[in-house]
Image (cartoon, helix red, strand yellow):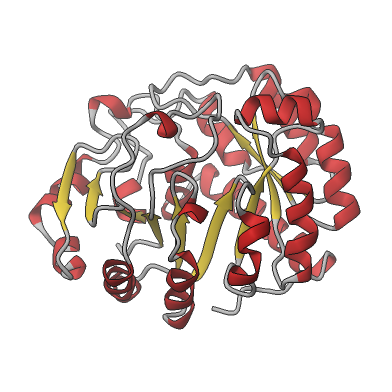
Amino acid sequence: MKPILLHYYITLRCNARCSFCTIWQDEPGQDANLSDVTSNLSHARKSGCRFVDFTGGEPLLNKDLPEFLRQAKRLGFITSVTTNCLLFPERVKELAGLIDLLHFSLDADTPEMHDAIRGRRSFHLVLESIDLALKNRLAPDLLVTYTDENIAALEGVIRLGREKKLMIILDPVFAVASQDRVSPQTHAQAIEYSKQKGVYLNRALITLRNGGGNHAASPLCKAVDATIVIMPDNRLALPCFHHRQEFVELHGDLDRVLTSQMRSDARGMQGRYPFCEGCHINCYFDPSFSYMRNRLFVQSMAAKLGYAWRKHVVFHRPLPLS
């Protein structure tokens, strides 16, 4: 079974202090470098990966991000970047035309609430970044990490998306420790929002949570099958970033590592580790749904097709060229 997504953590540094995230509290270590990224991208593409998500931390803190993106596009990847926009206005010219799936984090319709959630004044920079992106051949989505606290503050975000012809992505906050931090009432409200034109929510994520998340006795997670996770210091992380138990040093030999016994053992244990009980981490289940043949697969595919239709046909945003 070939992986579809490369999660490439190019930095663990972050210039925000988000209330729902702990990455900024950790020791950041080194950033990914161009030589390693170029080699790993080539091997990952040969292994079957079609998407690469350059992530962090805040990915724009890595000075080489534009070159990473150029290398990925050269290899035929569909590229993805999510940013808090603190650096986007000063780097937009470097990124023009290189990002297929660009996400701007916007968590409320007022600067007071958004900035409080993000721990930095960034609301005004998100608004500035929207116009700059559209002028530079980039079509951002507005990514809302929703919680019980901010779900009622999304009306203005949805209006802004409609005005600018941008998709709104509703992303339920997740808990690494498995228990869902979002109430059923909040999820129900998010589902109602998703019925509006231009608002995307992968309903499979909610169905998964309503069923108690992953169950180790009958696992749904396909994190190792579906994704490759590379750390900034050039190590493969297994089974996933948030529950990384083992690391494999990469020396230009990602293709060998992907067929190693260690990764094979991790594949056999995916969804079965003790910490997998109740897990519902969005960034691993979203690609995992593509490997299922059940209700979750149907819901996920329906949501993605709806997203693509609205963004690329109704809003006339360019299709990924890769």
Q: Residue at point 50% right, 25% down? A: 211
Relative side of 106 to 99, left or right: right
Along the line of sight, which residue is nearer the eye, 40 or 307? 40
On screen, residue 235 above or below 69:
above
**Residue 308, percent from left and from top:** 69, 63
Q: Residue furthest bottom?
A: 74
**Residue 138, percent from left and from top:** 69, 67
Q: Residue furthest front?
A: 90
- Res. 197 visible in picture: no
Along the line of sight, which residue is nearer the eye, 27 or 117? 27
**Residue 134, percent from left and from top:** 77, 66
- Res. 230 visible in picture: yes
Q: Residue furthest left?
A: 261
Q: Where is the C terminus found, in terms of image quarters? A: bottom right
Q: Residue at point 45% right, 62% down? A: 63
**Residue 210, percent from left and from top:** 55, 24
Q: Residue at point 73% right, 55% down? A: 129
Relative side of 65 to 95, left or right: left
Along the line of sight, which residue is nearer the eye, 78 or 112? 112
Which quadrant of the structure image shows residue 252? bottom left
Q: How many marks?
A: 0
On screen, residue 246 above or below 312:
above
